[in-house]
Amino acid sequence: MLRKFQIVGIAGALIFSAVILTSPSNPPPLPEPIVQNISTESVEIVATNFEKPWSIAFADDRIFVSEKSGKIRVITTSGVLDTPLITLHTPEIFGGGLLGITTHPNFSDNHFLYAYYTYEENEKLWNKIIKITEEDSKAIQVITILDKIPGSAFSNGGVIKFGPDGKLYVGTGSVSDSSNESQNLDSLTGKILRLNDDGTIPSDNPFSESFVFSYGHRNPTGFAWNEQGKMYAAESGPTKNDEINLIKSGQNYGWPEVQCHSDNDSFENPVECFDPGLEPGGMIFYSGDKLDIGSTMILASQKATNLFKVEINDDGVNLDRILSGVGRIRDVAQGPDGYVYILTTNTDGKAFPAPDDDKLLRILR
């Protein structure tokens, strides 16, 4: 059931429309909102004033947020810490910078945080993956585990997540729409990569001595695994033809030879292709008990400025709006408290940000 509700922020009123689901039970253990004058029982502001944020990661009682300018911000029960966990040197480009971050599945023991970011060397753009060791919300060691992933000003991919198999999955961009490197198995361009947590190649990868798990991608923006362990990826098209793909080991997803569906058995067809485009962001399969939506996919969208529940069936997908009215939504994540968190991206140059954008929001019901 849809209803309208209102959040009052520091700078004024924000109007939302959301699907009202179940009531929250116990208060979540993660950080309380830093904005207290909120008039809704459905969504609350956890933190504000992020600069071009891209990704959310969780660690026990803390939340990490990446900013494309190179900072990993730390949110605790006291709010956003003044000092970032780390500040990386990133170029000022539209589609790159510090992008995906993720915590190790055993973060409580090893304090490993992984990040994917763009850098410039000799007037050429590259991406790398680093492993950060954290202590007291500070980076005490940084190790590069994969380097020289071709970069560009626009399509760098950047999503990075641990799968249920404990392997690190990384989406890389096609660099240029005129490039055919997404089809080249010897290139790291336009791929989904699969790594061990130390950056080595898993012995069961589909191609011998290769990080490549799947290929023929343009610009992956989100990964999620369902209860059966099936992997899905959101992918941004050039101006339209955004896709949701079921990712299979060793398969070719067609870019740039194919956009959307093909009769060529050499290419995997998407679960859904969107025209007009949504500019998809992060995605999850919900497994908590705070929202009455079952174990369904939740997808963030930037151009469509909605958070969607995605129902997958034999004919494709159905999209049901969960939340709108907050502008562009870059990432969605499920916290250890079972609540859904979203990250807006209204300061990325494609929107008109409010004075306190961008925001980390928690959906309560």
Image (spheres, rainbow, N blue to C red):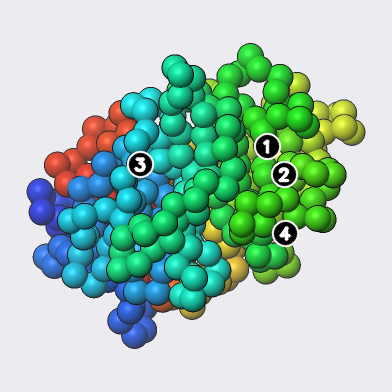
Secondary structure beneath disc 4?
loop
The residue where tag 3 is placed is 88
The residue where tag 4 is placed is 230
Secondary structure beneath disc 2?
loop
Whether the residues at callouts 3 and 4 have beta carbons within 8 Å, the answer is no
The residue where tag 1 is placed is 191
Classify 354 as above or below 83. Answer: above
Count of marks placed on residues: 4
Disc on res. 274:
none
Alpha-carbon distance for marks 1 and 4? Answer: 18 Å
Q: Earlier in the sequence, mark 2 or mark 1?
A: 1
Q: Is residue 267 visible?
A: yes
The structure residue drawn at horizontal position 65% and vertical position 30%, both measured from the top left corner, is 189
Decide if residue 209 is on the left or right side of residue 301.
right
Secondary structure beneath disc 1?
strand
The residue where tag 2 is placed is 211
